[in-house]
Amino acid sequence: MGASGTAGAEAIKAAGGLCLAQDPETADFPGMPQRLIQSGYADQTLRVEDMPAVLRRYAEQPLGVAESAPQLAPHGPKANQLEQQLWDMLQILRARTGRDFSPFKTAMVVRRVQRRMGLLGTTALESYGTRLRESSAEVTALANDLMINVTGFFRDCDAWEVLRESVIRPLVFQRETGEAIRAWVTPCASGEEAYSLAMLLDEEAERAGKAFDVKIIATDTTDEVLARARAGVYPSGIEGSLSAQRLERFFDSDEHSYRIKRKLREQVVFAPQDVLRDPPFSRLDVVTCRNLLIYLNPEAQRRTLALLHSALREGGHLLLGNAESLAGADALFEVVSKRWRIFRRAGPACPRVELPAMAPRPEIHSRIAAPLQQGARSSAIPSIQHTLLEEIGPPTAVIVECCIR
């Protein structure tokens, strides 16, 4: 009853599976399917008698690719028809949404495309490509599927306990009352991980008899999940992940849901940011980036780890997912817990941090061409330079500090 199905749906979605909810109007007890729909985990809402056909169609999808498939690249020597079709789809997503999914592993992209095809009843990849070009709704649906928006409170609870003992408790011990503690959670999905970190900091601060200026920056690329995270409202199925003491201390509850208390919500700032594209934050004590690297190709993993290294203050700590590794960035971090993927920043700032430019909007081409059509090349150059900086360059601030004696 209530939210009983939500935890199972979360696990299925995390594996790229399919979740169907019964139409609440046809249910004797509509509460459970309604909660699943509200959680955002339901792919379709159907009458029970319509579900078998959808399940069979989904299971019979022939598309598949090995985990060792080459990375996507257009017209490369290893590109076959499947890879080229997938590459073309990613370019549609980039043009329509501004998100670049080419750093994702081919196998992961295929699974998400296959999932969308199963839901639509499309068996030919070419037909799905046509659907993607013609439907803005399908572009949004595929982009959202490629973003991993599944998380939970204290997911992999042993990792959080090691983080408490090895990172949070020493950090609280070293800082004086009133000092700042800064953290970054990316991607944050619906917010549970950011709030989990805030709970640990609050518990350890109380244990030490201190109070801090805590600010946790939680970022993701999807406005819908950021809105849910900001609201801080979760279904009653979260009791399996949180102790009764934490539920009492950090949540207000009603019959079917829990809301994060205002004090904790005010410590977390949710904002849109793409760690693969946008400049990182800086001088952070803790960064968590869990279950993102496993979906990226090796080059994107290397670039992301360099960005996270630059975001940490010297001696700051990084928490990855339990299936992730430093992927060739061992020189940037020291191991705190190999099993639970906790690392300490080593050395000074990374000597070369790549900040990939934002995908240009379609109108940029006409804005660059216009000056060339209107006058000589020499007079057009300043206008083109301004357009390129405005449209493609990452957001940048230059601060000049003057000292007059």
Image (cartoon, rainbow, N blue to C red):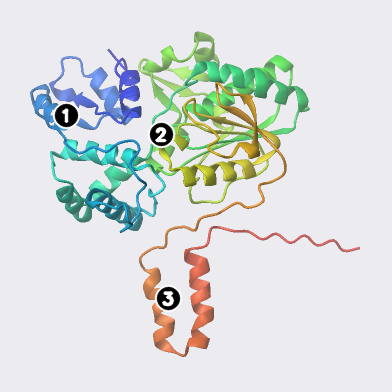
Q: Is residue 292 visible?
A: no
Instruction: Name the quadrant containing residue 401.
Output: bottom right
On screen, residue 190 above or below 348: above
Task: Name the residue rendered at 60%, 51% in the picture.
Answer: 353
First in sequence: mark 3 vs mark 1 = 1
* Count of numbered marks: 3
Q: Mark 1 and 2 residues: CB-CB less than 8 Å, in contact?
A: no
Marking on residue 59: 1
Disc number lying in front (3 or 1):
1
Mark 3 residue element: helix
Q: CA distance from mark 2 to mark 3?
A: 39 Å
Task: Name the residue rendered at 38%, 72% in the picture.
Answer: 365
Q: Mark 3 and 1 residues: CB-CB less than 8 Å, in contact?
A: no
On screen, residue 95 above or below 281: below
Q: Quadrant of the C terminus?
A: bottom right
Marking on residue 368: 3
Mark 2 residue element: helix
Q: Residue furthest right?
A: 405
Give the amino acid type for the residue marked by disc 1 in the picture.
Answer: Ala
Q: CA distance from mark 3 to mark 1?
A: 48 Å
Q: Residues within 10 Å of mark 2 (few under 14, many from 20)?
A: some
The x and y percentages for residue 131 are 18, 51
- Provide the residue designation for mark 2: 228
Task: Name the residue rendered at 42%, 76% in the picture.
Answer: 368
Mark 1 residue element: helix
Give the amino acid type for the residue marked by disc 3 in the picture.
Answer: Ile
Give the amino acid type for the residue marked by disc 2 in the picture.
Answer: Arg
Viewer-closest of 273 and 334: 334
Q: Residues within 10 Å of mark 1 (few under 14, many from 20)?
A: few
Q: Residue furthest top?
A: 244
Marking on residue 158: none
Q: Mark 2 and 3 residues: CB-CB less than 8 Å, in contact?
A: no
